[in-house]
Amino acid sequence: MRTLAIANQKGGVGKTTTAINLGTALAATGKQVLIFDTDPQGNASTGIDIHPGDSAITSYEVLTGMELFAKAIMPTKVPNLYIIPADANLSGIESELMSAERAQFRLRDAVARFRSDGAQHIDYMLIDCPPSLNVLTVNALTAADAVLVPLQTEYFALEGLAQLVSTINAVKANLNPALEIQGVVLTMYDRRTTLSEQVATEVRKHFPDKVYETVIPRNVRISEAPSHGLPAIIYDQNATGSKAYIQLAKEMIERERAAA
């Protein structure tokens, strides 16, 4: 199981949208995909029509050690796509884990046990991280093989990226030596503006081998899809944003094969 944390300390950059749509696109290729929702808002869950109360076991129970990882996995309406949902209980987990043993390793330990049990095959786990550096994000980065960074093509996103790289390097040095940046995905790209192109050029200059060729455009259909409880590529497969996520999944699989 290849584990990717979808992370950026800045909010509103498309982390959840990327988790849902990239996960759906990978599932469409026949990959078994699991979304692990670590955001207390639970948007990755509701975005694929999983609501509070639909499951008695959530990521909160997994992270606190109350339930096994395998028991929390639930299917979605999308073939080959599974989720461990989140709800508001995660909001208070920081204080609960503050003095707990191996607080930063809760997800990593749960994943290790799941892998050793071998009860269910999963090709990719995508961890949807909250928009902040807290115990949930650190757990995700500690458990991940690599980080996928959605980056909004706006000026302030560059400052946020520098902070994220610093965080990744700190986790790599202290908790997860194998952690790497898998790729940077440019989101909310508007070809009509000079700023989008300038930001894209600047990011590619700093991360020449990491930035995906596929960019995710600003697209109203992507924004509408969550209100219908559907990934955008199912809500409207012909939308430009949907096509972009399908292309991103293809590019990611090619990159993963080349790195294997």
Image: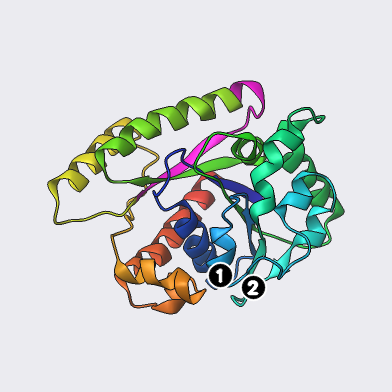
Q: From the viewer's perspective, is residue 88 above or below residue 222?
A: above
Whole-percent x, y for residue 31 in the image: 61, 66
Q: Is residue 197 left or right of residue 92?
A: left
Whole-percent x, y for residue 245 in the image: 41, 63
Amino acid on which the number 1 mark rests in the picture = Ile
Q: Secondary structure at mark 2?
A: loop
Q: Secondary structure at mark 1?
A: loop
Residue at screen point 43% across, 28% down: 163
Amino acid on which the number 2 mark rests in the picture = Thr
Whole-percent x, y for residue 127 in the image: 60, 50
Quarter of image, res 118: bottom right
Observer-nearest residue: 21 or 156?
156
Observer-nearest residue: 119 or 191?
191
Tell me the residue that label 1 is attached to. Answer: 48
Q: Is residue 243 left or right of residue 51?
A: left
Give the Cα separation between the discs numbered 1 and 2.
7 Å
Label tally: 2
Q: Is residue 64 magenta?
A: no
Can residue 167 be seen here? The reply is yes
Indicate the colouring scheme. rainbow
Tell me the residue that label 2 is attached to. Answer: 76
Q: Which segment is the magenta one?
A: 172-186
Can residue 242 be seen here? The reply is no
Residue at screen point 37% across, 67% down: 222
Observer-nearest residue: 236 or 80?
236
Q: Is residue 52 left or right of residue 21?
A: right
Residue at screen point 77% across, 50% down: 62
Label 1 close to label 2 by CB (< 8 Å): yes
Quarter of image, res 202: top left
